Image (spheres, helix red, strand yellow):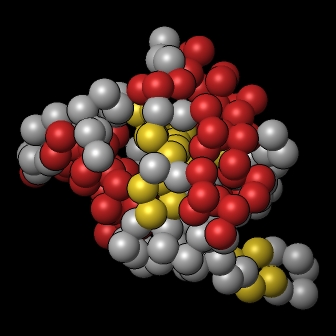
Amino acid sequence: MDFSGIKAIAFDVDGVFTDGGILCDLQGELFRTFDAKDGFAVRMAVMHGYPCAVITGGRSKSILERFRTVGMKDEDIYLGCRIKSEQLEDFCRRHSLSFDEVLFIGDDIPDIPALEVCGIAYCPADAVPEVKAVCDVVSSCRGGRGCVREAVEAVMKAHGDWTFDPKLYKRMF
């Protein structure tokens, strides 16, 4: 797969950054487990100037807080999404991108509209069959277990950007 035309990356959350499991306390607060290596990959993308977005049906404030810690801008964190291609269109418009320049990672049926219009459709190994059928790449990794890292690395390596600058990292994070 040629990732050299990709300039931005957009992600679903549950089943992509997480294994899909959600814990709920008695007050209704939802808890998710995120893979730190996936988060670091997004930080690398942000450090190198790649626009990154989260487009999720989830509504928890914890999602917003998690993605702020990896350097995403609030306006690129879309919560409560129902037709994800609409938020992907907004993300592209605001960053002067075409759909073809965006890799989208999704794992379940609500992700299909965004996967069908993006430049490269990517999913974790444990995505539902309907999603796998529309994806260009099925990761070797499961959701919450490195599929984000794999995709981000592929894009950045295609551009020669998978390099770490500790001083820049310290300044940004």
Identify the residue at horizontal 48%, vertical 73% (top origin).
125
In the rendered view, would you say 76 is above or below 125?
A: above
Could you say where residue 159 lies in the image, as x and y percent from the top left? 17, 35
Identify the residue at horizontal 53%, vertical 52% (top origin).
135
Could you say where residue 33 lies in the image, as x and y percent from the top left? 55, 79
In the rendered view, would you say 24 is above or below 131?
A: below
Viewer-proximal residue among 140 and 68:
140
Dividing the picture into quadrants, the one containing residue 92 is: top right
> Does residue 63 appear left or right of residue 39 in this picture?
right
Could you say where residue 38 lies in the image, as x and y percent from the top left? 38, 64
In the rendered view, would you say 124 is above or below 152?
A: below
> Does residue 23 appear left or right of residue 133 in this picture?
right
In the rendered image, the residue lying farthest to the right is 27
In the rendered view, would you say 10 is above or below 118?
A: below
Dividing the picture into quadrants, the one containing residue 22 is: bottom right
Q: How many marks?
A: 0
Could you say where residue 149 lies in the image, as x and y percent from the top left? 33, 62
Identify the residue at horizontal 40%, vertical 75% (top origin).
141
Q: Is residue 159 visible?
A: yes
Q: Is residue 51 visible?
A: no
Identify the residue at horizontal 90%, vertical 87% (top origin).
26
Viewer-proximal residue among 107 and 9:
107
Viewer-proximal residue among 7 and 135:
135
